[in-house]
Image (tube, helix red, strand yellow):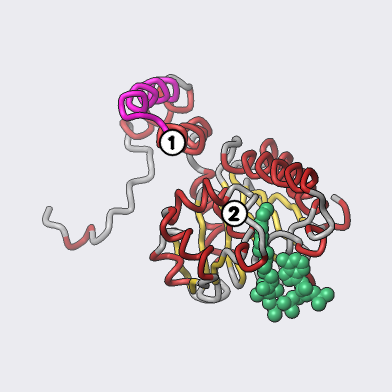
Amino acid sequence: MSEQLVTYEVNGDIAMIGLNRAAKRNAIGDALIEALADAVRRAETEAKAGVIFGHGPHFCAGLDLAEHVQKTAIQGIRGSRRWHAVFDTIQRGAIPYVCALHGAVVGGGLELAAAAHIRVADATAFFALPEGQRGIFVGGGGSVRVARLMSAARMTDLMLTGRVLNAEQGERANLVQYLVPAGEALATAQEIARAAAQNAFLSNYAVINALPRIQDMAQDDGLFVESLVASFTQTSPEATERLQAFLEKRATPLAVPNLKERPA
Ligand code: 1HE
């Protein structure tokens, strides 16, 4: 991977993918997006889940503006389409991704985070889409993924006003599923990825590939596709073994909250 713009290691079943350009706040240029693509391609076959995080004081300051200012319109379109392709391999690939967020999660950084399946923010995280202030528009899939996460109305507000959301506001706006104390995002993300990696591969594949597509379908089509996917996953040998394990009381019980306080 050129200049280690992205670090990659497999820890147990988990691919740890780190944006590694801290001096430039992990701003994403052409070389970094290719390094990210390489890491994601390896993770597909070498791991059961992935964690994406940022080295240094921020997750990611978005698009590399120094590189972008040099680009022609056609180079800009090619760049945007390349981001789309790479982020799509994260969102609709073979394994689930958890994003660990701290500091700036800005512009293209938020677009990258939105391509992951679960987002964990620590208390230092902040979210913004300053494209309007920079005279540009989102180009890394934000108008689709970020708008679907937080609503087009909230995204419009962020883009028109330059408003910056703190970590709690980000959670309230549905940008993240977990909010943890400062410095704990990476460890929590790893824990979540390890839990997801325990699931049957086909179940995870259905969650990350079927669920978002079903969201985009009409109700009747969605219900039909759900039945097909359900029957497809059910017939795998892994599903048979897992169902059998439950019936034979070999499966780990659900962690039911307040179990001791429930009447027998
Ligand atoms: C950069 C970038 C960048 C920092 N491209 N070089 N993104 C933005 O508009 C956000 C721009 N960045 C910032 O507002 C701030 O850097 C942060 C709030 C994220 C962090 O502040 P701070 O004080 O920790 O760092 P800094 O001193 O501002 O930046 C350190 C260096 O990183 C500095 O370079 P240096 O050579 O002067 O040391 C900065 O110039 C550099 N740097 N951010 C290039 N983004 C696919 S479409 C997506 C469209 C977008 O993402 S638009 C949003 C772009």
Tell me the kind of residue under disc 2: Glu
Q: Is residue 57 visible?
A: no
Please give the name of the residue rendered at 58% of the width and 61% of the height, measured from the top-left corner. Answer: 100
Rate crowding at label 1 as few (under 14), some (14 to 19) or many (20 or more) other CA atoms within 10 Å: some
Label 2 beta carbon less than 8 Å to ligand 1:
yes
Q: Is residue 54 above or below residue 88?
A: below
Q: Nearer the viewer, residue 160 or 205?
A: 160
Q: Is residue 22 above or below residue 47?
A: below
Q: Quadrant of residue 108?
A: bottom right
Q: Nearer the viewer, residue 134 or 168?
A: 134
Task: Reply yes or no: does residue 171 show up in magenta.
Answer: no
Mark on residue 14?
none
Judging from the image, what secondary structure is the residue with disc 2 in? helix
- Which x, y percent locates residue 119? 51, 57
The mark lying in front, picked from 2 and 1, is 2
- Which x, y percent locates residue 241? 43, 27
- Farthest residue in the right direction? 3
Judging from the image, what secondary structure is the residue with disc 1 in? helix
Q: In this figure, which residue is indicated by the disc labeled 2?
A: 111
Please give the name of the residue rendered at 57% of the width and 37% of the height, measured from the top-left corner. Answer: 92
- Farthest residue in the left direction? 263
* Image-quarter location of ligand 1: bottom right
Q: Is residue 117 visible?
A: yes
| 52 to the left or right of 229 | right
User: Magenta span covers which residues?
Assistant: 216-233
Q: Main secondary structure of the magenta part?
A: helix
Tell me the kind of residue under disc 1: Leu
- Which x, y percent locates residue 110? 58, 59
Rate crowding at label 2 as few (under 14), some (14 to 19) or many (20 or more) other CA atoms within 10 Å: many
Q: In this figure, which residue is indicated by the disc labeled 1?
A: 211
Label 1 beta carbon less than 8 Å to ligand 1:
no
Please give the name of the residue rendered at 84% of the width and 57% of the height, measured from the top-left corner. Answer: 70
